[in-house]
Amino acid sequence: MLVKALLKTGQLDKVTSRTLDYDNQVIATEKYDAAKTFKKCQGYQSVIASVGQHIVYIEDRNGNLVREKEIQFYIRGIRCASMEQQIGALPSETWNKIRLGTQEMPV
């Protein structure tokens, strides 16, 4: 519904290539319908997806939607000294570059 509204009002078009930013937050809980999350705890995963400044999707889920749909994704994390050291130990020829919005980064 959100995408249809943005298309109808001209805020998005079907021609321009865009980046979808898909963010979720794990909320740990022991409720009966909670599922195991990627953080290995029982909980819910609230999701907000946006294209530029426009919110295109909102969901509160308890499953693993991305894995089931075979969607390519990446997980961003807060960097620390030990992570920097581990990443730095990887051979540079094993990395590919991708563009996310205006940023080019190795993956």
Image (cartoon, rainbow, N blue to C red):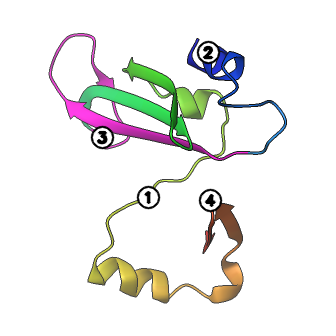
Which residue sits at x=56%, y=33%? Answer: 66
Which is in the foreground here, disc 2 or disc 1? 2
Residue 97: x and y, percent? 70, 72
Of badges 2 and 3, nearer the viewer stands: 2
Say which residue appears at 66% left-offset and 19% top-offset.
9
Give the mark, 3 or 4, whose residue is nearer the N terminus: 3
Cα–Cα gap, marks 2 and 1: 29 Å
| Quadrant position of residue 93 | bottom right
Label 2 Cα neighbours within 10 Å, binned few <14 / some 14-19 / many ≥20? few
Q: Which residue is mark 2?
A: 5
Residue type at mark 3? Answer: Lys
Residue 10: image location, x then y, percent: 70, 25
Kind of residue sitting beneath label 4: Leu
Q: CA distance from mark 2 to mark 4?
A: 25 Å
The residue beneath circle 1 is: 76
84 lies above or below 43: below
Q: Nearer the viewer, residue 19 or 30?
A: 19
Mark 3 neighbour class, 10 Å CA radius: few under 14, some 14 to 19, many 20 or more = few
The alpha-carbon separation of the residues under discs 3 and 1 comes to 17 Å
Question: Which of the marked residues, 2 or 3, is nearer the chain's N terminus?
Answer: 2
For the residue labelled by badge 1, is the local secondary structure a helix, a strand or a loop?
A: loop
